[in-house]
Image (cartoon, rainbow, N blue to C red):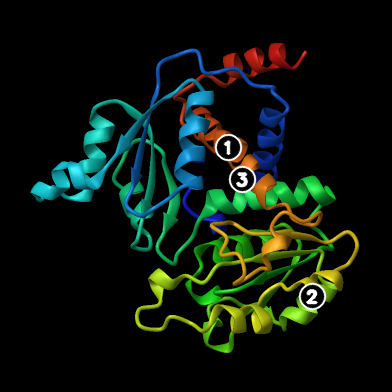
């Protein structure tokens, strides 16, 4: 891999390789890199889980995190985003992590940089590292993707998480269905739409999404209680789920809106497990990018990890 920008770029083999690497790291089969490396984190949108898990992932790998704060940077003096990214590259960053409100911004930067770029979310485009940790959580549950029926339910039209997961799950052989308010359907996603009741009763996993209010403009959706009853996961719907089925959510969770409050930490919920897996998934992505680019030595890293796993 040269960069990590979109789940559409990855084959089934590449996705499974990353999942298995993340699993190995989670099993503590990894040592920090044996050289000084820097990671530049450029976040232009609010973030808790993604930013913190990247920071923790980088430190577990033995890297130093270079955090960027736009309001205290030279962007305020007219510097372009490209020049900011080139500055990080020139100062010695080995990888750049970027979250930006505009779609394809990470890809545009990647085309002009000599270091690997990771898309940490680009507007309504994609969120590939979130998808990877979601896939890791599903794989831990079922040890497969083929034959599974996965529902993605919520604000489909405005969700980069929905897009990345729909692409990746289809690549991996799962059946994907979508569920949302009619006005939030996305015609660019060639998947069937079902009611939330059908999704609850027939799917192996339901991935819930929050309402992306910040991307709606004047359309603020509907009353939270009405939304939950019509389109969310209520206790009554959860009771109709199959015994083995699980609940997923990329977070932040709006309790009582897309999901009943008490279901967030219910036995079927894997929401906090997803958050935990985020660190290991992002460690796997960074590790493979640095190896594939020749920034770190794969042989030395693998030998060191093999010693740790004994």
Is residue 14 rendered to the left or right of residue 48? right
Residue extending furthest toward the bottom: 182
Identify the mark at residue 275; answer none if there is no mark.
Answer: 3
Name the residue that disc number 1 marks.
Answer: 279
The residue that appears at 68% across and 40% down in the rendered structure is 17
Q: Position of residue 282 (x, y in %)?
A: 55, 39
Alpha-carbon neighbours of circle 3 within 10 Å: few (<14), some, or many (≥20)?
many
Measured as percent of width and height from the top left, residue 212 is found at 47, 70
Judge by depth and name the residue closer to the eye, 254 or 151: 254
SS category of the residue bearing label 2: helix
> With respect to residue 208, does 26 lie above or below?
above
Q: Are marks 1 and 3 in contact (CB under 8 Å)?
A: no
> In terms of sequence position, does the residue under pointer 2 or pointer 1 come before the other?
2
Q: Nearer the viewer, mark 2 or mark 1?
A: 2
Q: Please, what secondary structure does the residue beneath circle 1 have? A: helix
Q: Quadrant of the C terminus?
A: top right
Q: Determine whether 179 is above or below 168 in the image.
A: below
Q: How many marks?
A: 3
Residue drawn at point x = 14 percent, y = 43 percent: 74
Q: Which residue is mark 2?
A: 237
Which numbered marker is on residue 8?
Answer: none
């Amino acid at each position: 891999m040269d960069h990590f920008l979109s789940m559409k770029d990855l084959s089934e083999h590449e996705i499974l390789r990353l999942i298995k690497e993340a699993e190995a790291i989670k099993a503590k089969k990894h040592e920090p890199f044996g050289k000084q490396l820097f990671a530049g984190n450029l976040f232009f949108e609010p973030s808790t889980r993604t930013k913190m898990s990247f920071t923790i992932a980088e430190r577990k790998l033995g890297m130093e995190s270079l955090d960027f704060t736009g309001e205290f940077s030279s962007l305020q003096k007219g510097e372009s985003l490209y020049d900011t990214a080139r500055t990080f590259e020139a100062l010695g960053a080995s990888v750049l992590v970027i979250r930006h409100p505009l779609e394809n911004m990470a890809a545009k930067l990647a085309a002009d940089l000599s270091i690997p770029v990771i898309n940490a979310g680009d507007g309504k485009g994609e969120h590939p590292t979130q998808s990877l940790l979601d896939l890791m959580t599903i794989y831990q549950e079922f040890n497969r993707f083929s034959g599974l029926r996965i529902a993605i339910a919520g604000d489909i039209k405005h969700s980069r998480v929905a897009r990345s997961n729909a692409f990746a799950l289809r690549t991996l052989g799962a059946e994907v269905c979508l569920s949302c308010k009619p006005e939030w359907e996305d015609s660019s996603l060639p998947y069937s739409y079902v009611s939330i009741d059908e999704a609850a009763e027939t799917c192996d996993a339901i991935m819930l999404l929050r309402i992306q209010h910040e991307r709606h403009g004047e359309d603020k959706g509907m009353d939270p209680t009405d939304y939950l009853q019509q389109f969310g996961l209520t206790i009554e719907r959860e009771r109709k789920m199959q015994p083995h089925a699980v609940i997923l959510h990329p977070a932040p969770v709006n309790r009582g809106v897309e999901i009943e409050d008490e279901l967030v930490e219910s036995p079927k919920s894997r929401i906090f497990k997803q958050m935990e897996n985020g660190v290991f998934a992002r460690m796997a992505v960074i590790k493979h990018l640095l190896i594939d680019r020749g920034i770190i030595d794969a042989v030395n890293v693998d030998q060191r990890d093999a010693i740790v796993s004994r």
